[in-house]
Amino acid sequence: MAGLLLGHVLAYVIAVPDPHQRAFVLQRTGHEYLPAAAEAALVLALAGMAAVVIRAFAPGAPGGSERFSRLAGRLGLVQVLAFGGLEVVERIVAGAPLRHLASDHILVVGMAVQVVVAVAGAAFLWWLARTSTKLAETIALPTSLPRAGAVVALASTSWSPSPTTFGSIGNVRAPPSS
């Protein structure tokens, strides 16, 4: 959803570069919902990123194993189809004629932008999944400390440390004994 809305905004910026004309086009084609949708998309994007990271830490999860090309292709297809459907529904709800989709070049520009945004989004998600998986593997590595076996210690009175056993600081006099 975040990629779809980002691509949506970029498509209108590219297809209708004049800000005043763009505001007019957006108003007459049923885009009043975009600010609320952008907030929802931000929340969903953060939740999605958290899900990718959490999945990498799940026991037995094959995180980061999907090929980039497959991820980008699926994301691109979903975003292009969603953009086309969204533009048609917006215009139907607003009562705007569908023929303006072709005359403003918004449909063609929008679909191209959706592909670019989908590839960038897939690259980010792929990187996040692989990085999270590597981090999870690093954290889960067992510590290879040597295990202590049975230790036998026998007390002996025949050995006592000499002054040089633990080191000596020279000719130091002991305190007086009385």
Image (cartoon, helix red, strand yellow):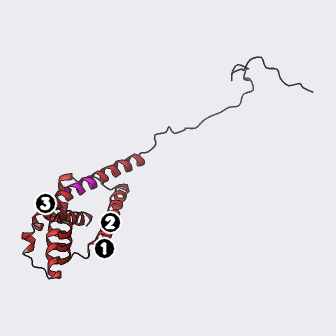
Dots 2, 3 in contact, CB < 8 A = no
Q: On the rendered image, what quadrant is the N terminus found in? A: bottom left
Q: Is residue 4 above or below residue 146?
A: below
The stretch in magenta equals 118-126
Indicate whether 33 appears above or below 47: below
Q: Give the structural element (helix, strand or loop) at label 1.
A: helix
Q: Which residue is mark 3?
A: 112
Residue for badge 2 = 42
Q: Which residue is pictured at 17% across the width and 81% down the height?
A: 94
Q: Is residue 178 left or right of residue 40?
A: right
Tag 1 and tag 2, C-beta contact below 8 Å = no
Secondary structure at numbered mark 2: helix
Q: CA distance from mark 1 to mark 2?
A: 10 Å
Q: What amino acid type should be assigned to the residue bearing mark 1?
A: Ala
Q: Is residue 156 left or right of residue 22?
A: right
The Cα–Cα distance between marks 1 and 3, rounded to whole angstroms, is: 24 Å
Q: Amino acid at mark 3?
A: Ala
Mark 1 or 3 closer to N-term?
1
| Image marks 1 and 3: residues in contact by CB distance under 8 Å | no
